[in-house]
Image: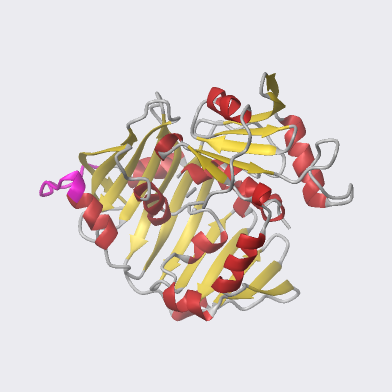
Amino acid sequence: MSIISRYPTLRWAVPVAVAGVAVGTTALVSSSAGAAAPLPKRSAAQLLVDLQTADQVAGSGTVVQKADLGLPALPAVGGSGSSDLSSLVSGNHTLRVWYDGRTKVRLALMGTLGESDVIRNGQDLWTWASDSNSATHRRLPAEVTAQDKRPVSDLVNPGLTPQQLADRALAAISPTTLISTDGTARIAGRNAYELVLAPRDRSSLVGQIRIAVDAERKVPLRVQVIGKNATKPALEAGFTQISFATPASSQFTFRPPPGVKLTEGTVPPVAESSKATASAADSEAPTISGTGWTSVVRARMPVTGDGRPSGSSADRPAAELTGILARLPHVSGTWGSGRLLRSNLVTVLLTDDGQVLAGAVAPERLYELAGHPLPAATATP
């Protein structure tokens, strides 16, 4: 069981969530090399409509992802070359993607010595890690298959493909966002328009999000998240090769290899899941302070009397979390004391009394909020 699954509030502390939203600088340069052919002009508003109304076509391709968030060296973060899905928050990674409608999706993270796969085929949801030869199988509720409009990776892991990152960026569009265009580009051998989203509030750590929109298919080919006052992306995901041919059905059929350690499970129906969430203690539910690009997520993490994460000393997730916290800088002020995780896009404060605050803001904003009581729980986005 991972830290994030054991302590659900910590999912907000994952820096990639800024975009989150699933590799090689050389590959990225080569994917955009060459000038784009002259294209008819399209406004930012037209490109937004293109993205939101594009057909969910079938296809496959190779996605190159680069994360340079400026994170400190931490345990349990594999970095470049790792095939562990948690390593996507740092370093360079290559993913293979197959897609055939909304209920057939496969993502494969290709590591130096292994591979991790996430496969959805109707109600069947599989994950597999080659390095441990372990797999999990879950049956999704029927209403998810019939009604859910999200790709499978949004159900099991922060989005990291260009489509997922674009969806998350578009969800933030409001009076808080400046929207513009910036010429054209050539991505994976295809012509694309460059759409730019930027926060109006300059106190946000995010400078801009750039989305390369395929001129013909209207789907995202590359997404870049650039920090304030930065010239290089802190997070980038783009196709280096893409095909819109329908993948073979065998791509979505998982056959456990010999000797695999298989774990079977179920996902509760939507109604039951909602009841479970509603019955959780208010102190466990995240709240939102502020709006737009500078909003801050606040939550409380279960702790023991001495401030350590709850769980026995033999509890691996608790021990793993304790090790991470010990490596973070200790900070204090009139608000109290705690540990600070700072990156190019997100700042996370974990106070000694168990409060977690995270946002695309400077530490001072988190210190200010930490000095006030945690408000009543609000619906999370």
Residue drawn at the location 34% of the way across and 49% of the way down? 170
- Image height check: is 354 above or below 129? above
Say whether residue 90 is visible.
no
Q: Nearer the viewer, residue 38 or 202?
A: 202
> What span is in magenta?
34-45
Measured as percent of width and height from the top left, residue 364 is found at 55, 22
Using residue 351 as the reference point, say whether residue 117 is left or right of it: left
Q: Nearer the viewer, residue 78 or 121?
A: 121
Total labels: the figure holds 0
Q: Nearer the viewer, residue 220 or 308?
A: 308
Residue drawn at the location 38% of the way across and 41% of the way down? 224
Residue 94 colored magenta? no
Q: Quadrant of the N terminus?
A: bottom right
Residue drawn at the location 56% of the way across and 45% of the way down? 287
Residue 35 colored magenta? yes
Q: Main secondary structure of the magenta part?
A: loop
Residue drawn at the location 26% of the way across and 47% of the way down? 186
Say whether residue 322 is visible.
yes
Q: Nearer the viewer, residue 340 or 229?
A: 340
Measured as percent of width and height from the top left, residue 68 is found at 51, 35
Measured as percent of width and height from the top left, residue 7 is found at 70, 51
